[in-house]
Amino acid sequence: MAIEYKTRTQLVVEILREKILSGEIVAGQPLRQAALANELNVSRIPVREALLQLEAEGLVIFEPHKGASATELSAAQVDELFELRAMIEGDLLAASLVHITDDALVQATDILVNLDSALGKENAANTWSELNSDFHNCLYSGANRPQTADLVNILNKNADRYIRMHLLWAGGISKAGPEHAELLAFCQARDIDNAVAKLKQHILNSRDEIKAFLLQREAN
Amino acid sequence: MAIEYKTRTQLVVEILREKILSGEIVAGQPLRQAALANELNVSRIPVREALLQLEAEGLVIFEPHKGASATELSAAQVDELFELRAMIEGDLLAASLVHITDDALVQATDILVNLDSALGKENAANTWSELNSDFHNCLYSGANRPQTADLVNILNKNADRYIRMHLLWAGGISKAGPEHAELLAFCQARDIDNAVAKLKQHILNSRDEIKAFLLQREAN
DNA sequence: TTATAATAGATTGTATAAAATAGGCAATGA
DNA sequence: TCATTGCCTATTTTATACAATCTATTATAA
């Protein structure tokens, strides 16, 4: 297997994204380029370019001469984000199920097993959200729509921070386990209508749980 | 009206985007940082950062140590892009029409007048596509979904290059004029279902025209 | 006391210079 | 002749240095 070369910028992107998603960098907090460069032992240029990339992902916002900061979390944004996801991912799943291979479905089953067993473990949030993303991407693999898949991944990178926060708080999206199983069953049966309905319901359910948590927190 | 400050990076973004959209920079052509910096009379750093932003918009692709190039145009991409637009913009319009103000509709009417008269003029492609974008955004102004609006604008920046190309070739999207008028009429009547249907049809029609052109060109 | 202007310090934005990497070409050996 | 190796050049990537801009604080005047 070929090793893939990574530029420092790319490494910094990954580190910062992880810190934002995990909550180590809290929303609204200004991101000082010099401090980050010092901490990561690189110059400011790769840090700057990494922040620009994260801006494109929506995790960071830039203001000229005022610098970057992690974007805020709000219930309104969650609403919008998860509704977009429900619509686009629903469409993507429908397109995918027409052509999806048995291989992909077997792979999805495997991921699901790991997903369930990940919940109790050490740093559940990281593993869980990664596997969760793998599971969904696996189901969309038959769609053959690269641009839409990219878009979904960007939206998911944004949704991820909310999901992780909720995982840390409540130990998990309560209904996710059974919902995943049902979704997979519909997919295996190539029952497009029910699969799409279940997927949308699944996404909107997690929206509701996360929103309830955020509203409660905003009240404080 | 406050003038807005622009960094050199932002200026370079605008210039390069314009060159790609207008076709002056052709797809696949490598974009040499040093040459661009020289031409625009800035250093390579702003050029680099501008290219990174354009990558986020999908107009440019980066390969480590090989540099950037304008992305290729293909009929398959048009299909995906315009179907995404039809879905998302349809949803956005539905959400918007519930709350849209009369002011916004009057403004849309004005834009439409300019749009029609722009067709014959000097550099029709630029003006037309800008006004076209304004018109659509105006109709979506009631939705109050900033994240979705951002997404739509990114997709439109991508679609724009195809639209401009087609404008240059055929003088215009043949059905756009009457379709815009019909769409606006449904919006003024707050007839959500028909408005959304018309919008989707409008987007998918332009897709068909553009795809036909691209397929013909690819055949050569 | 309040508001406005001036100044200092910090931080970003940009330019220039140095280091790292990829791709091509010539030299060497089978 | 063909393949392999090492070197050279073009280009990107990163570092350092400097200039422009913003923020907060202090001083001044109404």
Image (tube, coloured by chain):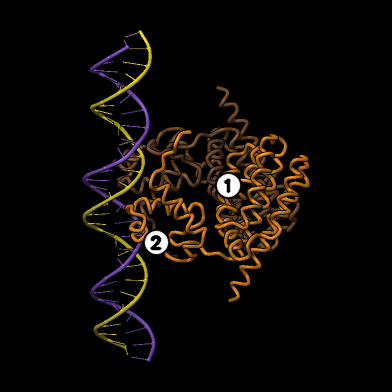
Chain colours: A orange, B brown, C purple, D yellow
User: Residue at 67% of width from left, 49% of height from top?
Assistant: B181
User: Residue at 64% of width from left, 52% of height from top?
Assistant: A117
Tag count in the figure?
2
Residue A48: give x, y in percent of width and height: 38, 54
How many angstroms separate mark 2 from mark 1 (CA)?
26 Å
In the drawing, does residue A54 fall left or right of residue B40? Answer: right
User: Residue at 66% of width from left, 67% of height from top?
Assistant: A212
In the picture, which quadrant includes the C terminus of chain A?
bottom right
The kind of residue on which mark 2 rests is Gly
The kind of residue on which mark 1 rests is Leu
Q: Are marks 2 and 1 on the same chain?
A: yes
**Circle 2 residues within 10 Å: few <14, some 14–19, many ≥20:** some
Q: Nearer the viewer, residue B60 or B141?
A: B60
Q: Pointer 1: what residue?
A: A151
Q: Mark 2 and 1 residues: CB-CB less than 8 Å, in contact?
A: no
Q: Secondary structure at mark 2?
A: strand
- Please say whether residue A41 is visible from this viewpoint: yes
Residue A46: give x, y in percent of width and height: 37, 50
Q: Nearer the viewer, residue B138 or B177?
A: B138
- Please say whether residue B24 is visible from this viewpoint: no
In the drawing, does residue D27 fall left or right of residue B131? Answer: left
Q: Chain of mark 1?
A: A
Residue D16: give x, y in percent of width and height: 24, 53
Q: Is residue B161 above or below residue C30?
A: below
Q: Secondary structure at mark 1?
A: helix
Q: Earlier in the sequence, mark 2 or mark 1?
A: 2
Q: Nearer the viewer, residue A209 or B198?
A: A209
Q: Chain of mark 2?
A: A
Q: Pointer 2: what residue?
A: A67
